[in-house]
Image (tube, rainbow, N blue to C red):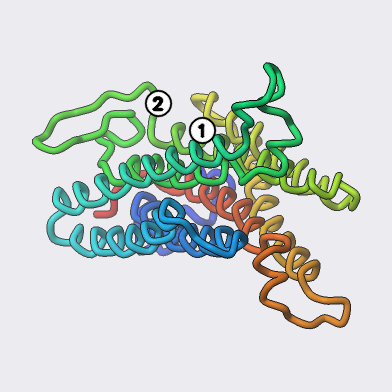
């Protein structure tokens, strides 16, 4: 199954094949994500002025995980089982880091000593650290682990583990990637809404990423639920992913403009405490994950 060729038939020509397989590109995307997550979290945690020990965990882990995944990719050229093991352990830790981060952010958003019914409120969630933000580490770990293990036969949902053992999943890798893209987009759009709610959506342009995010979520999840999508289904999906990709740099540009002074001067403090200029790129990240899902799922030979 080669969905991208269905959307754009000229891609199907042998000369158009990419030098890397879909899973290799997914792992490269995972490594890039880990690196930029570490940078983004460092900037976010600088807001308090002092980074406490727990907050250093994702900052240090992100770049380290990126390096380990690149090393695993190089080792895979000669020793695929060892590379798979390194990548899997790294990505499992990424899932743990994401879940712990979400927990730490959650407890910052609640008032345990408040009267019953007032411990948690929408207002608290709006102004608290982004609860869903750290879960990006978990999402990266999830799609990275999926990419690390070989699916044989292709699109069967059967992963070949160490020692030749086989794990039968309810969905093929391709359908699982569709669901992951949908859930990742949903988390991104919820985080965006909570962030923009601080401005009470005073700027009507803020509704655009919300609409694109909801559209991308629905389309990705729907495609994952369809066993044999038509060309029309795939075209709509590709358009949704391209819109997500476009929303990222546009949002980053607008956030940067908002952080500049009225004279257009750059002030570091405004970029640390102002609109997070890297955050909108999560939309592009989800769109790219979605588009990679359309590539040929077969291993390179």
In the figure, residue 6 lies in which quadrant?
A: top right
In front of the other: 97 or 193: 97
Residue at point 23% right, 64% down? 74
Regarding residue 6, the answer to whether it shows in the image is yes
Residue beneath label 2, please? 171
Instruction: Work out whether 243 lies above or below 78.
Output: above
Residue at point 71% right, 23% down? 118
Residue at point 13% right, 61% down? 78
Q: Marks 1 and 2: in contact by CB < 8 Å?
A: yes
Residue beneath label 1, please? 179
Location of residue 208 in the rendering, given as x and y in whole percent from the top left corner: 80, 48
Regarding residue 298, the answer to whether it shows in the image is no
Question: Is the C terminus in the top left, top right, bottom left or bottom right quadrant?
Answer: bottom left
Location of residue 243 in the rendering, given as x and y in whole percent from the top left corner: 70, 51
Instruction: Work out whether 289 lies above or below 164.
Output: below
In the figure, residue 16 lies in which quadrant?
A: bottom left
- Front of the two marks 2 and 1: 1
Q: CA distance from mark 2 to mark 1?
A: 10 Å
In front of the other: 151 or 85: 85
| Residue 267 shown left or right of residue 65 in the figure | right
Of the numbered discs 2 and 1, the one sitting upstream in the chain is 2
Location of residue 112 in the rendering, given as x and y in whole percent from the top left corner: 59, 27
Q: Secondary structure at mark 1?
A: helix
| Residue 42 shown left or right of residue 27 in the figure | right
């Amino acid at each position: 199954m080669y969905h991208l060729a269905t959307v754009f038939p000229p891609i199907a020509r042998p000369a158009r094949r990419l030098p890397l397989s879909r899973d290799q590109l997914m792992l490269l995307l995972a490594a890039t994500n880990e690196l930029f997550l570490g940078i983004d979290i460092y900037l976010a945690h600088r807001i308090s002025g002092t980074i406490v020990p727990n907050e250093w965990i994702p900052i240090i882990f992100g770049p380290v995980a990126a390096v380990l995944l690149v090393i695993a990719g190089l080792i895979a050229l000669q020793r695929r089982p060892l590379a798979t093991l390194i990548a899997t352990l790294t990505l499992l830790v990424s899932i743990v880091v994401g879940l712990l981060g979400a927990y730490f952010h959650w407890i910052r958003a609640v008032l345990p000593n408040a009267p019953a019914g007032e411990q948690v409120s929408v207002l608290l969630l709006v102004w608290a650290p982004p609860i869903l933000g750290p879960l990006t580490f978990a999402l990266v770990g999830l799609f990275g682990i999926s990419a690390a293990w070989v699916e044989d036969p292709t699109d069967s949902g059967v992963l070949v583990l160490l020692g030749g053992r086989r794990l039968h999943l309810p969905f093929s890798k391709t359908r699982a990637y569709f669901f992951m893209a949908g859930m990742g987009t949903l988390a991104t759009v919820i985080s965006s809404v909570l962030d923009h709610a601080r401005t009470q959506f005073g700027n009507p342009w803020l509704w655009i990423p919300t609409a694109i995010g909801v559209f991308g979520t629905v389309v990705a999840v729907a495609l994952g639920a369809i066993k044999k999508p038509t060309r029309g289904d795939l075209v709509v999906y590709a358009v949704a992913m391209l819109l997500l990709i476009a929303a990222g740099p546009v949002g980053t540009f607008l956030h940067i403009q908002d952080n500049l002074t009225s004279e257009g001067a750059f002030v570091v403090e405004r970029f640390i405490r102002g609109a997070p200029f890297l955050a909108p790129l999560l939309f592009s990240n989800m769109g790219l994950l979605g588009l990679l899902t359309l590539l040929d799922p077969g291993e390179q030979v």
